[in-house]
Amino acid sequence: MKGPWVGIVGHRGYSGAELVRILARHRSVAPVLLEHRDDHFDPIAIRNGKSLPRFPCTADAVRREGIELVFLATPPDVSMELAPMMLDAGARIVDLSGAFRLRTPENYTAWYKAPHTQPALLAEAACGLPEFCRERIRGARLVSNPGCYPTAANLAIRPLVEAGVVDRAAGIVCDAKSGVSGAGRKPSLETSFCEVTENFSAYSILKHRHVPEVLEISGLAEREFSFTAQLLPLKRGILETIYFRAVGVESAANLIEIYEQRYAGEPFIRLYNPGHMPDLRGVCRTNFCDIGVTFDATTGRAVVVCAIDNLVKGAAGQAVQNMNLMLGYPETEGLL
Amino acid sequence: MKGPWVGIVGHRGYSGAELVRILARHRSVAPVLLEHRDDHFDPIAIRNGKSLPRFPCTADAVRREGIELVFLATPPDVSMELAPMMLDAGARIVDLSGAFRLRTPENYTAWYKAPHTQPALLAEAACGLPEFCRERIRGARLVSNPGCYPTAANLAIRPLVEAGVVDRAAGIVCDAKSGVSGAGRKPSLETSFCEVTENFSAYSILKHRHVPEVLEISGLAEREFSFTAQLLPLKRGILETIYFRAVGVESAANLIEIYEQRYAGEPFIRLYNPGHMPDLRGVCRTNFCDIGVTFDATTGRAVVVCAIDNLVKGAAGQAVQNMNLMLGYPETEGLL
Amino acid sequence: MKGPWVGIVGHRGYSGAELVRILARHRSVAPVLLEHRDDHFDPIAIRNGKSLPRFPCTADAVRREGIELVFLATPPDVSMELAPMMLDAGARIVDLSGAFRLRTPENYTAWYKAPHTQPALLAEAACGLPEFCRERIRGARLVSNPGCYPTAANLAIRPLVEAGVVDRAAGIVCDAKSGVSGAGRKPSLETSFCEVTENFSAYSILKHRHVPEVLEISGLAEREFSFTAQLLPLKRGILETIYFRAVGVESAANLIEIYEQRYAGEPFIRLYNPGHMPDLRGVCRTNFCDIGVTFDATTGRAVVVCAIDNLVKGAAGQAVQNMNLMLGYPETEGLL
Amino acid sequence: MKGPWVGIVGHRGYSGAELVRILARHRSVAPVLLEHRDDHFDPIAIRNGKSLPRFPCTADAVRREGIELVFLATPPDVSMELAPMMLDAGARIVDLSGAFRLRTPENYTAWYKAPHTQPALLAEAACGLPEFCRERIRGARLVSNPGCYPTAANLAIRPLVEAGVVDRAAGIVCDAKSGVSGAGRKPSLETSFCEVTENFSAYSILKHRHVPEVLEISGLAEREFSFTAQLLPLKRGILETIYFRAVGVESAANLIEIYEQRYAGEPFIRLYNPGHMPDLRGVCRTNFCDIGVTFDATTGRAVVVCAIDNLVKGAAGQAVQNMNLMLGYPETEGLL
């Protein structure tokens, strides 16, 4: 028999549905659905299909069923409402919203345009980027899964900043492109098929609320970092093209070596040989983060391309990776 | 009755087909198809449809039919073969290939990996970017239509360089995304449906052969310019996201003013109000180049977004714009 | 100077926007926008662009500006509200909604699940399918533009029924596929990008409210006609695959001849040679209806493929074709 | 440790790549790649990735490595060349090509326009549709995986024919739509991105070479069956809309009951409740065949919608299902 129950709140959204898909393959935990509020989206009406256990999303149900960990695939305000309740009921939490990503209530309010109602939990929350915060995640009660754009950006940028090879005076540009599922499942004109297909557009230029997450983790200052988010006419995947001037570097191989040293033994980082670059197809429906490098020795200009699936390494997959660390399972369980 | 015959070589390719579409609406010229070599693609088999006159692509046919101008929507080697022949036969030429875009045979050989067989014509050819070369185009025998990426890049960048608002030490980044029609109609694995759909990928990073065209016209040095070309899963459109540090500028409005002054009276440049940005849908199937600006006053970082249809302003539309100038028609004829 | 004003209500929807696009090329009429209710969709914010005159959508404005004809690209209930008001104000009407398509209020109520509030206008309205109702359209005050599916279905089926070549006991199957713009611009989960892309689905099987329109015009009985509507992952276009047993026919050429005789001189019907079939690309952004035929002489089974652009021949283009007839312009003006 | 080696020939094609993906999750067999001929497509160049063992595609390698079963994801002529060689070397075979699907060499020649070079193997081959041929598959040396269209068509149609509820005089229409991967990976104009995107087209109307497979298995006569194949602008999935007049049936539930009885215990058939219909999204990347029914009691007309993933249940998934039967593993191993 399978091990402990883990609960999913928000299973009708894209990240929540991806959690269901991933956890169905997990050998050690048994997923249950916690129905937070009435939802009018029909479940699929297959006559001879099977479905997961469902409970109301209450502290009582969590306590009664002995649910050990709850994934919150909910908007930030709902996460702030549910997190203390679930912790009180004895569950640990992986939150996929932006509620606990920034370090101070003030920063949260500046970027999310709302007060933070759980400052103590904000202070307590561990950043759920295993490649940089693995030990804190293991012991945390509340893990805040990073945003999809910052996951890719920090995995690509932080090793370069740590290694001191970035000409910070010239700055770093991160030109990011995302599939439409990053905007969630709630219908809107911006994500309607006819508005997105055959189109490509930029939004939140220089002002995306994922920017402060990159600054906090990468160590860059605001003036050193330019970021544009753009909408691709496809469902899933993020590709970021990152530009900088490299100092103290002679070849693309030098840059790859920096990543190889930093990410030795990491199960979900794949590096490309010089001359090859990642694309979205290579990472879609996987928890991998693929990184490739181009370098022009005569001018010192470098380009790093980094690709993830926004719903997997950028959301549900990384959340399960965090759960594996928190509950003591192999980090890759359910994810390969 | 319509005026002079103009010939189209390469009408089965995407740029050539777009020329046919545009010239069908032109009030003053009558298009004819010049069949260069046997082509096995069937024409559309409509029973009660009409079609254009067709002639073999020979000097004889051009002379006999009195064709005044020929569009070469052909590969560079074919353009180098046909251009002297057509000029001898009395036709003027708008060439849509890369054959006559760079200023020296050496530069051509470096980027196109082949000798240039018509150096005298290369020296004679006028650059077909009307916003910067209008007077030369009017009198030219041979106009070289710019590449699709450089058309957008130069229209966005050159006014900024001229105005001296770019911090050139920090450099300019141009992150370019193109629809698949930019790769032409010849089948290849890279442009197969199943390889492109649901995918996004970078290619020719820092080394695209459109780069020297940008350098020649914008006035930037190689070390000041980083360029990446990327393939969007859609048919037509180019969007370029351009990053730089602005000097001597206080607001996005300042940058827009630079464009407004430079492009006063230009029929095909559209500027967006600060806070709004172009997208592909706005330019597809038009000859417009749309430009928008974002500026962060606290850090001095600026982002310009520039969009064109690669088959129109990036190819066939601009070619007709050039033809209008050469033959003395209103510059916008057939293009609005 | 251009001739009479014609008004467009609903210009922010897809059919309305297509009307704007088509009428901008029309040589004889001047379009104006009639703003029916507050709409939060931003118009495109181009700084140096031009725009059409706008008036409130009132009888007063129509009378004062002398608007001769109004296009209602609105939902059925709004069309029923506006039609009598516009007629009183002296304008003629082309209605693109379903309000005036069925012949009786009872039939309307059965299929649209709402009472019909303008039965006298319903009785008066002319069916806007020029290939079958041209003379009535010319003199009508109120023309009801047919639905997109029925336009294609009736153009393909009625000549066959008239010619008596359909084995009606065996019935006709119409398997219809439409682009997403047929569902309108209002955001919904069903038309969200992530739900539609990489998907294909059937809806309203046998029960689509366009079915009675086909029955009324084609002359088929309900039991003789099976219809399924299906959603293609693309923006525009309808392709219908129609199956029947042919009687008294020996070849595909026989079937094509039936169409050729029925549609002799029709400017917007294109017939394909046997062995070739229409596709969506051939009709997109045109007012053409393309028809092709396959026939198996050994079994008597026939397949007709019929393609239109749902926003053009299926909506705005046909509406302008009707306007041309009503106002005495060449039927193809603005549409070729 | 994993059990027997199984070989994959044609791993660079779409079906072959899907075999690699599925077998990587299989608990009991170890896949190896058999390289048939030089192939210039680069493998993915990930620096720290892993890959499968590779051997030349020779009888010697199969014998030496003790490969128990070989999947031929190859064109029919290559399958006819390799099948006897692999059988001689001691391997059993699942062939995914059309080489062994029809029952007689004459029929093969009529539809595939080539002689059949292995008539003895053709006579021996078992049809690889487990829902109808399970016992023969278990003991077969050579299993011929059915075509993608016939897999869906036969699963939907044969139970109805067996139950005698089809009015065969009126005939059955099967309107089939497929994603582009069904055409294979070899570049062609027909499958180029720009030709397929925003398009939809019919091909091989009434004459598709998958038709005889449907006739052989369903029991229908040629004159009773109309089939059209159509190309969807997406990568994977087949949806077939099937029309007939039902006799002796009173409701959709009656039809569902026929399927429930026929498919009781089948692990990969899912039936939808009346009022709901399958779509492509529900089956993509799964081995399921989803079936739904609509019935109009007043006219007796019925519509069945059947969906599969052409690369899984229509190719690689069904091939692994067959392998599981042949090698004695649980039928669903690797497929849920």
Image (spheres, coloured by chain):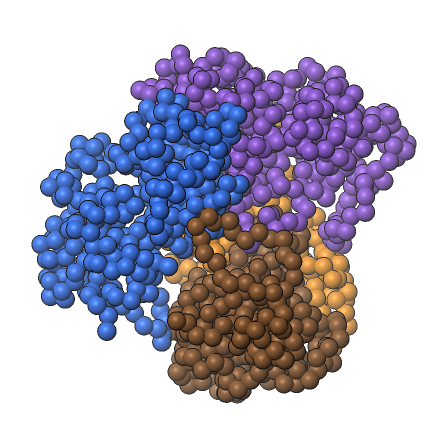
Chain colours: A blue, B purple, C orange, D brown
Count of marks overlaid on the render: 0
Viewport quadrant of the C terminus of chain C: top right
On screen, residue B78 above or below A223: below
Q: Quadrant of residue B267?
A: top right
Looking at the image, which residue is at 45% across and 56% down? D50
Q: Measured from the top left, where is residue D265 in percent x and y?
A: 39, 82
Looking at the image, which residue is at 27% across and 68% down? A52
> In the figure, is residue C214 to the left or right of A59?
right
Viewport quadrant of the N terminus of chain C: top right
Q: Measured from the top left, where is residue A309 in percent x and y?
A: 39, 49
> In the figure, is residue C194 to the left or right of D97?
left
Q: Quadrant of residue B333?
A: top right
Q: Nearer the viewer, residue D107 or C9?
A: D107
Q: Nearer the viewer, residue A113 or D98?
A: D98
Looking at the image, which residue is at 58% across and 28% down? B211
Point out the residue furthest to the left here: A88
Point out the residue furthest to the front here: D64
User: Can residue D257 be seen by looking at this rendering?
Assistant: no
Looking at the image, which residue is at 34% across and 58% down? A335
User: Can residue D282 be seen by looking at this rendering?
Assistant: yes
